[in-house]
Image (cartoon, grey):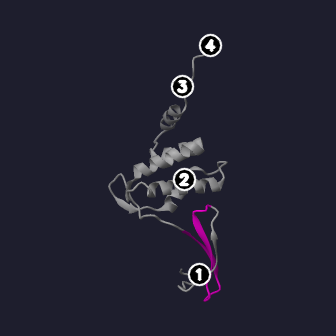
Amino acid sequence: MRCPFCGNIDTQVKDSRPAEDHVSIRRRRFCPACGGRFTTYERVQLRDLVVIKTSGKREDFDRDKLERSIRISMQKRPIDPERIDQMISGIVRRLESMGETDIPSKKIGEIVMEALARIDTVAYVRFASVYKNFQAADDFEEFVHELRPPNPPAEE
């Protein structure tokens, strides 16, 4: 592992343990060249995934990009960060276990929307506004209207 401080490629592992998400390994490392200490996380990657964009462009799946977009939608929401990490790990495991290496971005969006809907409605709407490319307030109104069940008629 290359030292992020001096670039030395000969770093030493001082401590390894399971990370809090129990899906990755946390390693404390030390660089003998500069004395720097840093932490790395390793996780099992079942297969290399490729995202097929709606434009047809192909790019490597980036877990960090997925995590950033989910965390943005959950900003300032009362959700435990550990629960968010578990959700992200679950989404990635689901994608890896689909049996395909090429996954349409639309499918990833649907899986994320499904997971967000179970955790937080506000985050779900925020993510949907980007995923479905809302252009006006009417788009929000229409989407939220679809979320709400119709009101039963009032009894007289």
- Residue 21: x percent and y percent? 61, 61
> What residue does disc 1 label?
5
| Crowd tier of the residue under label 2, counting other residues whose Cα lies within 10 Å: few below 14, some 14–19, many 20 or above | many
Highlighted magenta segment, given as a residue range:
21-42
Is there a contact, CB below 8 Å, between mark 1 and mark 2?
no
Question: Is residue 135 or residue 152 the one in the foreground?
Answer: 152
| Identity of the residue drawn at 55% across and 31% down | 148
Marks 1 and 3, how far apart in space?
A: 58 Å
> What residue does disc 2 label?
70
Residue 150 is tagged as 3
Marks 2 and 4, how far apart in space?
A: 42 Å
- Residue 137: x percent and y percent? 51, 37
Marks 1 and 2, how far apart in space?
A: 30 Å
Specify the amino acid type for callout 1. Answer: Phe
Specify the amino acid type for callout 2. Answer: Ile
- SS at mark 1 in the image: loop
| Identity of the residue drawn at 51% across and 66% down | 44
